[in-house]
Image (spheres, rainbow, N blue to C red):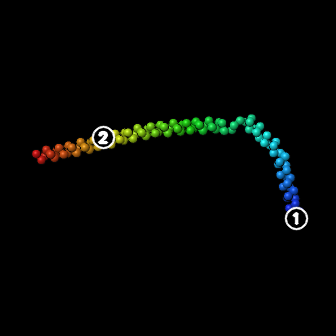
Amino acid sequence: MTTTNMFQANHEDAYDSDMDEGPDASIAFMANFSSVGCPSSSNNISINETLEAKTQTIDTLTTELERYKLKVEQLDTNRVKRELEMALAERKKRSNELE
């Protein structure tokens, strides 16, 4: 029973002491925060630079991908043309053999 009473008294004392120091602590925190400045401003610059570099990389890779897609289309077109020319040559050869 005595332990419970002491705990309650200690808890109340701790609560009261926190309340008394609360405003001073927040003022000190704001003073420290103001003197240091925004801690994330240099991080924001770094993040922005990284984001810009990644965006440039994506743009470069997208352009390169489009160029390769066009090249593949051209190669496919050339392959089809060659196959058609070979088929026509084979047909002409058979036609000449039949005459």
Question: Does 56 sit above or below residue 12?
Answer: above
Depth check: give the residue in front, 27 or 57: 27
Q: Nearer the viewer, mark 2 or mark 1?
A: 1
Residue 87: percent from the left, percent from the top? Answer: 22, 45
Amino acid type, residue under disc 1 in the picture: Met
Q: Quadrant of the C terminus?
A: top left
82 left or right of 53 in image: left
Task: State which tag comes first along the sequence, 2 or 1.
Answer: 1
Residue 5: percent from the left, percent from the top? Answer: 87, 60
Q: Quadrant of the N terminus?
A: bottom right
Q: Which mark is residue 78?
A: 2
Judge the density around disc 1: few (<14), some (14-19), many (≥20) Cα neighbours within 10 Å.
few
Residue 12: percent from the left, percent from the top? Answer: 85, 54
Q: Which residue is mark 1?
A: 1
Q: Secondary structure at mark 1?
A: loop
Q: CA distance from mark 2 to mark 1?
A: 96 Å
Residue at x 24% of width, y 42% of height = 85
Residue at x 82% of width, y 42% of height = 24
57 left or right of 71 in image: right
Residue at x 78% of width, y 42% of height = 26
